[in-house]
C-alpha cells in the first residue's frame, strides 16, 4: 500500500514522533514554520488529492481516496502498524483534528497502543459537528477559492491557479466527508486530549471544551486566528512541549 507518512523525520529515531495531520486545502507548506526544536515530528497525508486531512494544495495528482473519515483513519492506522510506529502523539487542526480523533478511536477498536496524547486545535467537539454543518449553506466555488487564496498567501505559499484549484477540490471533498460523518455516542479514549481554542477564530469556548466528553481533556486558549497554528506557532509549540512526557518530544524552548 502507498504510505501516508512523509518522512520529514524518522519515526524510528528512538523518540516518539508528533504526527501532524494537515488540514485540507491549506497547502503542503502549512507546517514549514515549525522549527526543528519541536523534536521529532512528521506530516502525514493520504497518497492522493482530495479530502479531509488530505493532500493539500500544490501536491501531486492521483486517484481519489475513500471519502469516509473512519476509512481514512483505518488506512492511516494500518500504515503506522505496518511500519511498527506505536509510540507517538497526534496533532490535527480544524477538521484534521477529527481525523486524529478517529485514528485514536480506530486504535482503541483494534486494541493497539493508544497515542501518547491527542492535540485537537481549532475544532469543535464532534457532538457539535452536525449542528454546525446544518447552520450553513454549501459554499460556492468562488467562496472556497477566496478561502484558499487567503490561506495560501497567509502561509507564504504561491497561489498559482493549479494550486488554488487543487485546494478548492480538497475543501469540497472535505465538506462532503464532514456531512457524511456521523458520530457515535461519546466514549472516553484511552489517551489524554489537549483541546486548543484560538481566541480570534470565532469558535465558542463551549464547543471546544466539549472534547471533555471524549476523554481526559485540558482546554488551552491561545491568542491568534485559525491560521496561527501555521503562521505563528510558538505558543502552540510550548503547549505541545509542556504536555509531552520527558524524553519523548523535546520542548520547543530547548535550543
Image (cartoon, grey):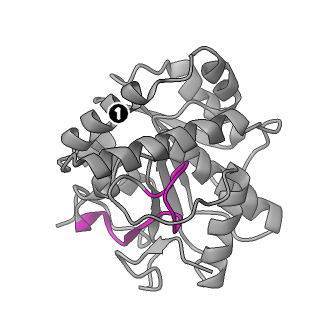
Dot 1 surroundings within 10 Å: few (below 14), some, or many (20 or more)?
Answer: some
Residue 47 appears at what percent x and percent y? 51, 69
Look at the picture and state if 50 lies above or below 245: above
Residue 159 appears at what percent x and percent y? 22, 45
Viewer-closest of 104 and 220: 104
Viewer-closest of 108 and 184: 184
Q: How many marks?
A: 1
Quadrant containing the N terminus in the rendered view: bottom right
Residue at 54%, 28% in the rendered image: 208
Viewer-closest of 119 and 102: 102
Residue 72 appears at what percent x and percent y? 65, 59
Residue at 52%, 62% in the rendered image: 89
| Residue 207 image-quadrant placement | top right
Residue 43 inside the magenta-drawn segment: yes
Look at the picture and state if 168 lies above or below 17: above
Residue at numbered disc 1: 145
Q: Is residue 237 left or right of residue 12?
A: left
Quadrant containing the C terminus in the rendered view: bottom left
Q: Is residue 76 visible?
A: yes
Under circle 1, the secondary element is helix
Residue 20 appears at what percent x and percent y? 44, 59
Outermost residue to the top? 135
Q: Is residue 198 visible?
A: no
Q: Is residue 184 left or right of residue 124?
A: right
Q: Main SS of the magenta segment?
A: loop
Q: Which residues are magenta?
A: 36-55
Residue 23 inside the magenta-drawn segment: no
Residue at 70%, 50% in the rendered image: 68
Q: Is residue 142 left or right of residue 152?
A: right
Amino acid at each position: 500500500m502507498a504510505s501516508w507518512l512523509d518522512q520529514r523525520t524518522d519515526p524510528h529515531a528512538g523518540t516518539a514522533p508528533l504526527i501532524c495531520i494537515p488540514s485540507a486545502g491549506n497547502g503542503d507548506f502549512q507546517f514549514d514554520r515549525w522549527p526543528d526544536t519541536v523534536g521529532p515530528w512528521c506530516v502525514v497525508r493520504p497518497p492522493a488529492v482530495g479530502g479531509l486531512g488530505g493532500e493539500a494544495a500544490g501536491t501531486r495528482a492521483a486517484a481519489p481516496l475513500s471519502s469516509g473519515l473512519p476509512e481514512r483513519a483505518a488506512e492511516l492506522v494500518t500504515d503506522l502498524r505496518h511500519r511498527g510506529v506505536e509510540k507517538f502523539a497526534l496533532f490535527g487542526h480544524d477538521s484534521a483534528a477529527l481525523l486524529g480523533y478517529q485514528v485514536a478511536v480506530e486504535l482503541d477498536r483494534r486494541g493497539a497502543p493508544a497515542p501518547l496524547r491527542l492535540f485537537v486545535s481549532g475544532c469543535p467537539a464532534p457532538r457539535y459537528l452536525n449542528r454546525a454543518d446544518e447552520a450553513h449553506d454549501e459554499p460556492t466555488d468562488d467562496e472556497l477559492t477566496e478561502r484558499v487564496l487567503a490561506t495560501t498567501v497567509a502561509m507564504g505559499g504561491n497561489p498559482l491557479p493549479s494550486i488554488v484549484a487543487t485546494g478548492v477540490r480538497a475543501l469540497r471533498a472535505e465538506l462532503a466527508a464532514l456531512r457524511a460523518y456521523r458520530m457515535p455516542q461519546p466514549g472516553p479514549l484511552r489517551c489524554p486530549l489537549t483541546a486548543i481554542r484560538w481566541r480570534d477564530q470565532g469558535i465558542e469556548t463551549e464547543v471546544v471544551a466539549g472534547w471533555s466528553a471524549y476523554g481526559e481533556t485540558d482546554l488551552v486558549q491561545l491568542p491568534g486566528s485559525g491560521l496561527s497554528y501555521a503562521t505563528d506557532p510558538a505558543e502552540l509549540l510550548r503547549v505541545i512541549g509542556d504536555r509531552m512526557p520527558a524524553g519523548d518530544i523535546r520542548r520547543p524552548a530547548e535550543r
